[in-house]
Amino acid sequence: MSSEPLHKAFREHGTHNFMIRELDECDENEFESKTNQWIEKYNPEYNVITPKKEITEIVKEIKIKPIVKIEPWGTLTDENRGNGKHSGIRIRGKNLSTGICTDYENARMAALSLTGDPNKNGNILLAAKKDGTAYGHKWQLLEEKSKKKPVFGVNKKTEQIELRYESIADAVRSISPGAKSSGLIKSLRNPGRYSWKGYLWFYG
């Protein structure tokens, strides 16, 4: 329950909304002057020029796990989204009663249109792949897409793209043979937030 402005901000906004970033390196005898130099430069809302001893105690007391922010890869865009929920295979449904054909961008859109629930897309997609019927429609795929989606890994420390693979399976086989892919998938589904094997993972 420290009265320090920064500590109050942690309590008000949550420590997960703050990020630690290294700004400079120095010898111990330069610590106070360097700290004050950066505070003067940025004039941060929660920091004031503080004697070295107090700053050291504050740093020791605040034990926050650093959060690495990667731009532009950390931002979900049309280019790096690719998790299967926002893009998909175009399909066509033929109403068995009327004979009218309707094209949809993906099975989720078709399910939403016909049932009101986009999560009922599984039956439609299965029917389209097998040239079958579902929800009173005969379905067919309008395009073929590979199930493989390329992935790449960004080193958390260097923030550089260092690894590229044709698919999730290829990445797991290469980096951690025999391991489950759940950690990598979690990183892919939460771009820039979770890492796997020291890397932040993205589709693309």
Image (cartoon, grey):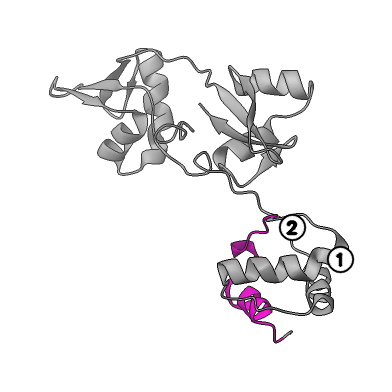
Q: Is residue 141 magenta?
A: no
As helix, strand or loop, the secondary structure at mark 1 comes to helix
Q: Nearer the viewer, residue 58 or 94?
A: 58
Residue 14 seen anywhere in this rendered image of the structure: no
Q: Which residue is mark 1?
A: 29
* Amino acid type assigned to the residue bearing label 2 in the image: Lys
Q: CA distance from mark 2 to mark 1?
A: 26 Å
- Is 63 left or right of 130, judged from the image as shown? right
Q: Quadrant of residue 109?
A: top left
Res. 157 image quadrant: top right
Q: Residues within 10 Å of mark 1 (few under 14, many from 20)?
A: few
Specify the amino acid type for callout 1: Asn
Residue drawn at x 65%, y 44% as measured from the top left:
194
The answer to which image quadrant residue 102 occupies is: top left
Residue nearest the viewer, comparing 177 with 23: 23
The magenta stretch is: 3-22
